Image: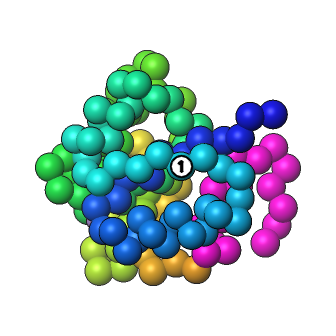
Amino acid sequence: MASKHILHIEDNPSNRKAVQHILRMTDYELTEAVNGQEALDALENVSPDLILLDMQLPKVSGFDVAKRVKADDRLKHIPIIAVTSYAFSGDEDRAFEVGCDDYVSKPYRPKVLLAHLRKFLEKHPSVP
Ligand code: MN
């Protein structure tokens, strides 16, 4: 079976590095976008199995990216995990309002992120 493909949208280079590192423990394929506009451009050409979406993004916010994805018949089936920051309380509720399927809040531990990813990407996710 082909490996699953994740689109990670994140403007902070250290957070991108952290996710690259975590995903090395898996066979998931990774595509990255560094702002909301780049993500929307990438989604013209790729159809990932999951979107990991930082909500605090330059140009087009994560909230607007989620709205656009969930309004697009070709893309709306793709699960979105919102990545929210502890510093922005209320973002979890707003993320669900714009159609995100789940959220993790920063800072998170690698195994917590992996558990969230597996919930959507594996038929039989193991309980961490
Ligand atoms: Mn950010």
- Residue 27 in the image: state x and y as whole percent: 71, 52
Q: As shown in the figure, which amino acid type bears the numbered disc 1?
A: Leu
Q: Is residue 65 shown left or right of residue 20?
A: left
Q: Is the magenta stretch mostly helix, strand or loop?
A: helix
Q: Does the magenta stretch include residue 101?
A: no
Residue at the image point whose x is 41% and y is 42% from the top:
99
- Residue 114 in the image: state x and y as whole percent: 66, 65
Residue at the image point whose x is 61% and y is 75% from the top:
110
Write down the region rendered in magenta. 110-128
Q: Is residue 127 magenta?
A: yes
The foreground one among 63 and 19 is 19
The foreground one among 116 and 21 is 21
Question: What residue occupies the far top of the structure in this picture?
Answer: 73
- Ligand 1 sits in which quadrant? bottom left
Residue at the image point whose x is 29% and y is 54% from the top:
34
Beta carbon of the mark 1 residue lies under 8 A of ligand 1: no
- Residue 44 in the image: state x and y as whole percent: 36, 25
**Total number of numbered discs in the rendering:** 1
Residue at the image point whose x is 46% and y is 29% from the top:
46
Residue 66 visible (yes or no): yes
Q: In which quarter of the image is the C terminus?
A: bottom right
Question: What residue occupies the far left of the structure in this picture?
Answer: 59
Q: In this view, does 79 lie above or below 13?
A: above
Q: In this view, does 43 lie above or below 51?
A: above
Report crowding for label 1: few under 14, some 14 to 19, many 20 or more residues within 10 A (C-alpha): some
- Residue 40 in the image: state x and y as whole percent: 30, 35
Colouring of the image:
rainbow
Residue 119 visible (yes or no): no
Which element type, helix, strand or loop, lies under badge 1? strand
Q: Is residue 115 above or below residue 69?
A: below
State the residue position of label 1.
30
